Amino acid sequence: MTRIVRRPGAFVCGIDAAMDVIGGKWKVLILWALNEKTCRFGELRRAVPGVTEKVLSSHLKELEDDGIVHREVYAEVPPRVEYSLTPLGLSLNAALEPLGAWGRDHIYRSAEEPGAEAAAESGVEVAAGPVAGPGSR
């Protein structure tokens, strides 16, 4: 049974409510990884380089509480747990796709601007490749 935690009246607008669900450095990357396939904890940890086990576990619990991620426990020895997106999680990823497209365009535009060369000489990084995001793999 999925338990969705709702906090009615605690938000100023829809963006505020959405950011409460996806806020944090790692949540959108977790969503992106789960958009590709159902994953076990270790697979997710490898798919999101840099995230600690503690933070990944905490974010998965929060996403589960918000009805975005489904946690399936299999009664096996050793126990197996798999994470997948719920229909709500899939719809959230679909909503994030335009944001990912905007980010890619912004990075490319920044790299093509005349000041990009000067920024590179001053040590400011400008990404040359695509920016990963939900649905961009």
Image (cartoon, rainbow, N blue to C red):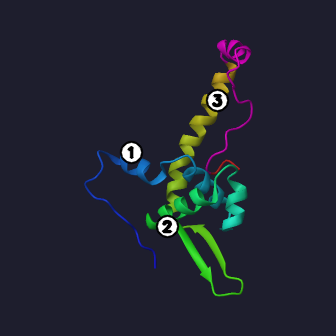
Instruction: Quadrant for residue 118, please give it.
Output: top right
The residue that disc 2 covers is: 64
x%, y% of residue 21?
Answer: 44, 54
The secondary structure type at the circle numbered 3 is: helix
Please report the residue visible at 60 percent of the width from the left and 80 percent of the height from the top: 73
**Is residue 28 positioned above or below 73 on the image?**
above
Please report the residue visible at 71 percent of the width from the left and 37 percent of the height from the top: 130
Tell me which segment is drawn in magenta.
Answer: 113-134
Question: Quick check: is 61 in the magenta stretch?
Answer: no
Tell which circle, 1 or 2, labels the residue nearer the N-terminal end. Answer: 1
Instruction: Quadrant for residue 122, please give it.
Output: top right
The residue that disc 1 covers is: 15
The secondary structure type at the circle numbered 1 is: helix
The secondary structure type at the circle numbered 2 is: helix
Please report the residue visible at 71 percent of the width from the left and 30 percent of the height from the top: 127
x%, y% of residue 87?
Answer: 51, 66
Instruction: Name the amino acid type tagged 2.
Output: Glu
Q: Residues within 10 Å of mark 3 (few under 14, many from 20)?
A: some
Tell which circle, 3 or 1, labels the residue nearer the N-terminal end. Answer: 1
Q: Nearer the viewer, mark 3 or mark 2?
A: 2
Find residue 78 and name its label: none
Tell which circle, 3 or 2, labels the residue nearer the N-terminal end. Answer: 2
**Is residue 81 positioned above or below 95 on the image?**
below
Give the CA distance from mark 3 to mark 1.
Answer: 23 Å
Is 89 on the left or on the right of 35, as rendered? left
Instruction: Name the amino acid type tagged 1.
Output: Ile
Question: Quick check: is 114 in the magenta stretch?
Answer: yes
Q: Main secondary structure of the magenta part?
A: loop
Instruction: Quadrant for residue 108, please give it.
Output: top right
| Residue 79 in view (yes/no) | yes
The residue that disc 3 covers is: 107
